[in-house]
Image: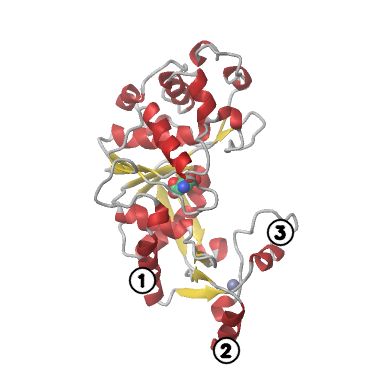
Amino acid sequence: MKGRFAPSPSGRMHLGNLFAALLAWLSARAAGGEMVLRMEDLDTARCKDVYARLLAEDLRWLGLTWEEGYGAGGPNGPYCQSERGALYAAAVETLAAQGLIYPCYCTRAERLAASAPHGGAEPAIYDCHCRTLSDGEREALAQQRPCALRVAVPAREITVHDRHMGDYTQHLARDCGDFIVRRADGLYAYQLAVVVDDGLMGVTEVARGADLLSSAPRQLWLYACLNLPPPEFRHIPLLLSPDGRRLSKRDKDLDMGILREHFRPETLVGYLAMLAGQQDKPEPVTSQELARYFVWDKVPRKDITLPAGRERFFNMQDCQDGATVIK
Ligand code: GLU
Ligand code: ZN
């Protein structure tokens, strides 16, 4: 049994990242398993070494240990995705040998123009037609622009048997569409990298935020194409602020830098343990102790809205330890 942390070092961790990291760790430890820490720093423009170091430091401070990976070494390195390009290239070759890879010449502007009227995020499904270009059309486009690489998904349903959330099914062609595995600027895509890495690192359980459940079917399909052993998935409910927004790295008041100034690790773990249904009250507890009685069945399946006491709990003037502050 081997679990993993796979954070993106693009900022300091916030309470929501902490919650997911704690549950991934508890799940592995409660089952006597090991943990790997891998830095998902593919987005070189946003990721920084200093955040990677702080992430590792913050995990240690919480008592969330790992025996393999960033800062610990091990047989399956390197443990930063930015150094694993050759492995991703080999995986793309494996897919190409099965006729599954084609160049996509669409620009970001073209993809956005085809998106919903509200703009903003790109649509989940973008049907770009580059799959059916003739050789001549391809050659002409290749003169003009660099290409991304897409993988052609089958018109087939894939079901993930999520051990916490239950079965989750997507029709790959209809619900997901052909997706990019290497961007036009040469960066490999998260969907490919995460499968190659968890597969080669021997990860047997992927426990992570429920925002990634919709990625799990295409990942499960990639495991099969790459002939890698798939892990078990357990998706974890997200923490929401009282107004129903997802916590993000923009919620500065909940980031680890500030949390660590005001709370002891066992106070934070105790609070998160309560949100995770493991104890009735936010009583301080170490992650080690908690691992002794952790059970998945008690973890909620719906997203968790932080109690209204949050303002007080995280009020920076409240320098008392949190357990005495939240009621
Ligand atoms: N690196 C991703 C993130 O920090 C997590 C990827 C995963 O757990 O599969 O959001
Ligand atoms: Zn295209």
Q: CA distance from mark 1 to mark 2?
A: 25 Å
Point out the tag, 1 or 3, that comes first from the N-terminus. Answer: 1
The residue carrying mark 3 is 116
Point out the tag, 2 or 3, that comes first from the N-terminus. Answer: 3
**Which residue is at 46% across, 73% downward?**
101
Answer with left or right where residue 22 lies relative to residue 254.
left
* Residue 136: mark: 2
The image shows a total of numbered marks equal to 3
Q: Is mark 1 within 8 Å of ligand 1?
A: no
Q: Amino acid at mark 2?
A: Gly
Point out the tag, 1 or 2, that comes first from the N-terminus. Answer: 1
Seen in the picture, residue 215 relative to 265 is either above or below; the reply is below
* Residue 94: mark: 1
Residue 158: percent from the left, percent from the top? 44, 60
Answer with left or right where residue 86 lies relative to residue 120.
left
User: Which is more toward the observer, 166 or 281?
Assistant: 281
- Circle 1 — which element? helix
Q: CA distance from mark 1 to mark 3?
A: 34 Å
